[in-house]
Image (cartoon, rainbow, N blue to C red):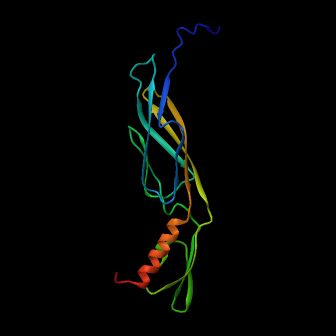
Amino acid sequence: MISTDTENLQIRTVTWTPKPGALFTLPETSAHLSRSITCTVRDPAFRGLAVTGYHASLEPKLATLSINCTAGAVHVTADRLHGSFDGMRLTYRQGNALIQAHSWDDLPASGIDLVTFHPSRTRRYDGRLVVTASLSDGTTEQATYTLCIFQDWTAGSLRLREEIHARCYPQE
């Protein structure tokens, strides 16, 4: 038999901060990113219900983002978003050889001439962050966030200028 007595029905209230949905939409030139996600639960039937920990999973993974779970929150951080897009290609001349590199870090420190720079053709990163809060009664609550990083090619252009300047004026 199903009870229709709604007067005594007590519903657990879950509040995510920030609200599930878009966590951020930022250009790749952004730096010092820091976002925290928390969950609070109010359950009239079980006073004292608390979040005991968090788990978070980001798909697809992104090397520039750090996801750290503590007992109090999930922390999404990045020193910089530059480098979020794979697929860049550099060609440089070393002696009489033309050599390709796929990151700035692959370039030798000196003794080369940059010949071509082809930035990644990827226009944006769309990630899905699923956060699970473990509760003191053994249950879990879950929220999903989207993370969007769009490429405007400014970071690659600035780095190219820096690399050329460093090679043309090594003493400055």
Reply above or below: 168 against 22: below
Which residue: 38% across, 37% down?
Answer: 72
Report which quarter residue 40 is drawn in.
top left
Please provide percent x and percent y for residue 144.
Answer: 55, 40
Can residue 108 be seen in this snapshot?
Answer: no
The foreground one among 35 and 71 is 35
Which residue: 47% across, 41% down?
Answer: 55
Please provide percent x and percent y for residue 82.
Answer: 48, 62
The foreground one among 169 and 6 is 169
Please provide percent x and percent y for residue 90.
Answer: 55, 76
Q: Quadrant of the C terminus?
A: bottom left
In this rendering, position of residue 89 left or right of residue 172: right
Reply above or below: 151 against 75: below
Which residue: 62% across, 8% down?
Answer: 4
> Which residue is situated farthest in the bottom direction here?
96
In this rendering, position of residue 147 left or right of residue 74: right
Reply above or below: 167 against 70: below
In this rendering, position of residue 36 left or right of residue 10: left
Can residue 88 be seen in this snapshot?
Answer: yes
Q: Quadrant of the N terminus?
A: top right
Report which quarter residue 168 is drawn in.
bottom left
